[in-house]
Image: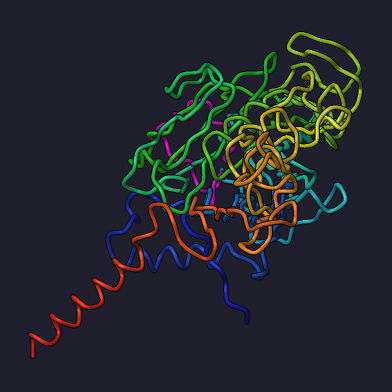
Amino acid sequence: MEPVRIPKETYYVPREMKPASLMSWSTLVVLVSISAGTAHADPTLRDGNGHSWQIDSDDGGIRNGTPDAFDGWPTLCITDDLSFAPTDECPFDDTYRTGFTEPTTGLAGREIITATVSLANLRVHRRIYVPDGPGQGWARYMEVLENPASTPTTVRLRVGTVSYGSLATIDGTGSFDVLASSDGGEALHRGLYWFTTGILCLGCGDSTVGFVMDGPGGSRLTTLENDVFGYPSRSLLWEYDDITVPARGTVAVVYFLTHEVTHQRAAVATEELSRASITTMAGIPETYQVINWDSPICGDSVLEDGEECDDGNADRADACTDVCRNATCGDGRVYAAMEECDDGMANADTRADRCRTDCTAPRCGDGVVDTGEGCDDGAANGTGAGACPSDCAEVGPSTSEDGGAPSASRDRGGCAVESGKLRGSNAFLPVALSALFLFGLRRRHRSR
């Protein structure tokens, strides 16, 4: 018999069973063992930025990301109890679980489709799409609710932390910080369309993550909370409290997640995801009624409010970008007809090997010593003795650019070498080292 894997912080545990006694934890193990099926590897997809998204085959949450992110978030709760409050933990019977039924795939293997289960008299499954195109560092979640009955059904849907614990983007002792948001503020409230959060320390291992909950014109979430179940820094949920699924119809709730290694990159990526496009909405079946998005679709050749252009494609390298913005230097997309490179906010004129702020590639003569160059004095290259050669190659002490007498050559630290002798501030370096050596020997002799 294969061992059963117990996912971290993903099972509902009644309050009376939370870490209190051996009896509580033994009951939890029995509970998990009964609900679990055959163990198998959780599927993992890599996005266009090389980040991994490991999908839990039981609840469809993200077991882990690259770097550390989510750790089991988001789980799903669907109930027909409309009096259910945000402060109430989701009952186990209303929490989406497949019993570790192996998921299937769609969209050429880029979409994980979890098993269908029955919740609140609806047939429910999750679809997690992770594209791998250049710059596509995100995942799209789609919660699919199918009503097999001949009458409409109204339910409450919760995404995120459905019971205690879960979201591990911030350590357990930290605070939940909104770093960027759709209204520019730092407060979490249900009027937001998107926001980013993350741990504010160096070397903590966690990334900055972004959430895009819905789009303009669609049904708005009724709750957006993080301080729930006694875990203010590790909990996050949002809810729609009155989703009506028509008779024999299918409703979908679509949202996006991203995780990046810097706050700035996460803010840019998340804001761009908030603008629906033919790329972000690719592969959604026409029979699904997406209730929380009704914003302009970038790439449909129709110029609508919020779009600067729309050329009917998802090309990142032409004059109208894949987010329907006019191509500009610094937008992180290489406009092939006008730009040599574009690293967005990473463009720099003073750092080696960076795309320059005019979107030209680093080159000899730009005043920055890049890989493969011995020196670079910019416009002064090749102007005479002591200057960097016009090809940015280091000049040795026995040769000069014109093949004549020896000329000065400078290393990257600015130390000049002439006729094999050190000059400048480093001239006293050998003397200083010798003095330190002799001083050390003298102290050692005295200690004897």
Q: Is residue 88 or residue 431 the one in the foreground?
A: 431
Residue displayed at 60% across by 22% down: 242
Q: Is residue 355 magenta?
A: no
Residue occupying the point 36% across, 42% down = 231
Where is residue 100 drawn, in percent x and y?
65, 61
Q: Is residue 383 above or below residue 238?
A: below
Q: Is residue 285 visible?
A: yes
Judged left or right of residue 271, residue 443 is left
Q: From the viewer's perspective, is residue 19 above or below residue 161?
A: below
Image-quadrant location for residue 215? top right
Residue sitting nearer the eye, 201 or 317? 317
Q: Which residues are magenta?
A: 72-93
Instruction: Give the residue at x 53% y 41%.
Output: 262
Of residues 325 and 88, which is closer to you in this image? 325
The quarter holding residue 281 reads top right
Asked if the magenta segment contains residue 85, the reply would be: yes
x and y percentages locating residue 403 in the rendered image? 74, 57
Magenta-colored segment: predominant secondary structure:
loop
Quarter of the C terminus within the rendering = bottom left
Q: Position of residue 160 (x, y in %)?
A: 53, 39
Residue 139 visible? The answer is: no
Residue placed furthest toward the front: 405
